Image (spheres, rainbow, N blue to C red):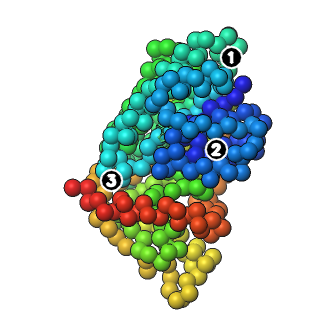
Amino acid sequence: MSIIITGAAGFIGSNFILNYSNLVSEKIIGFDKLTYAGNLENLKTIKDSTNFKFIDGDIVDSELVANLLNKYQPRAIINFAAESHVDRSIIAPDVFMQTNIMGTYSLLEEARKYFISLNKNNKNNFRFLHVSTDEVYGTLAINEPPFREDRKYMPNNPYSASKAASDHLVRAWHYTYSLPVLTINCSNNYGPFQLSEKFIPLCITRALQIKPIPIYGDGKQIRDWLYVIDHCNGILTVLEKGIIGETYNIGGWNEKTNLEVAQKICELLDELKPRCDGNSYQELITFVKERPSHDRRYAIDASKIYNELGWKPKENFETGIRKTLDWHLDNESWSYIHSHDYQYLHNNDFS
Ligand code: NAD
């Protein structure tokens, strides 16, 4: 038996595989289309392992998915594959609909056919775990309680709408076809291998290049930050102990405004890599035009996974951001590879 990981070469998928391969010796099949967001370099420490096989392919390609399932006979599929950047979804939504909706549909439908073919024991053990986001719930007012699993879906941008659609498909394939699914809705992740188009690595790489650090609007948007390895361990906990058909919210109990996050990064960089000119990195923080439909606050109530499955994050923001900065300082060339993305996105005014 094996486990199939889609989106294997992306930020969370590659962290998951590296972390998982240290814990168990199960055969891992990494499946990824290698879009601009996929980078096989992330997997270089495992690529020659006999327990790992990488397949370059598209989750929308149902024939390829069917062949993979039949060949590798997985006991689980974990679906990380997605178009994941809100700004890109505003500029070019089409690929988000293709991958996030049609891709999830193709995986579910081929998983359903494969599941029917399994014997009773393998049916009992099979799981389809879908990785989703807290953004499907829309935005929270400052005084509202954090998102619980029973919160109404109210996505506000093409990315979150496409993820919401995929979550509904996963639910439907469980209720209609009894496919043993699990869904995770997670808050903002940060850590190694995250592209610099996302907020935390963007702040870090721009600071290290002594370039303006762009903050949308007033910078008071609130996000709940989770160190990526804590997310990966939460996913494993749900895979092993989660109740079929259930959704679990995963968060870090670390609500911060974007401005606070940027200031913290600058403060730590002042300590870890002081600027030659003696100035603080803080002077690079620059406010730019607000993004359309920018959700004001996301926050996760992770008490269900904590109370029922015993998971809680090991890192707080202070420890997680230090690890992330240490990684960036040790891997500055990796960080710069994608620093052109900022230019691509900010040449658009969303009009
Ligand atoms: P990412 O953009 O870094 O990686 C996505 C990966 O999917 C890439 O390797 C890409 O090549 C691959 N991919 C894209 N389209 C594909 C296709 N059609 N077929 C096969 N592979 C394809 O994203 P990420 O940050 O690692 O996010 C992974 C998942 O976690 C996504 O579903 C995302 O919605 C969810 N999520 C992310 C966060 C976060 O903060 N990053 C938070 C909550 C949930």
Of callouts 1 and 2, which one flags the residue occurring earlier in the amino acid sequence? 2
The type of residue carrying mark 1 is Asn
Q: Compared to 220, does 128 lie above or below?
A: above
- Which element carries disc 1, helix, strand or loop? helix
Disc assigned to residue 122: 1
Of the pair 11 and 251, the residue shown nearer to us: 11
Residue 342: quadrant of the picture: bottom left
Disc assigned to residue 294: 3
Quarter placement of the C terminus: bottom left
- Which element carries disc 2, helix, strand or loop? helix
Q: Please provide percent x and percent y for residue 221.
A: 38, 58
Q: Please provide percent x and percent y for residue 82.
A: 47, 40
Q: Compared to 195, does 205 lie above or below?
A: below
Task: Name the residue at 58% across, 73% down.
Answer: 268
- Which of discs 3 and 1 lies nearer the camera? The answer is 1
Q: Give the CA separation, mark 3 to mark 1.
A: 44 Å
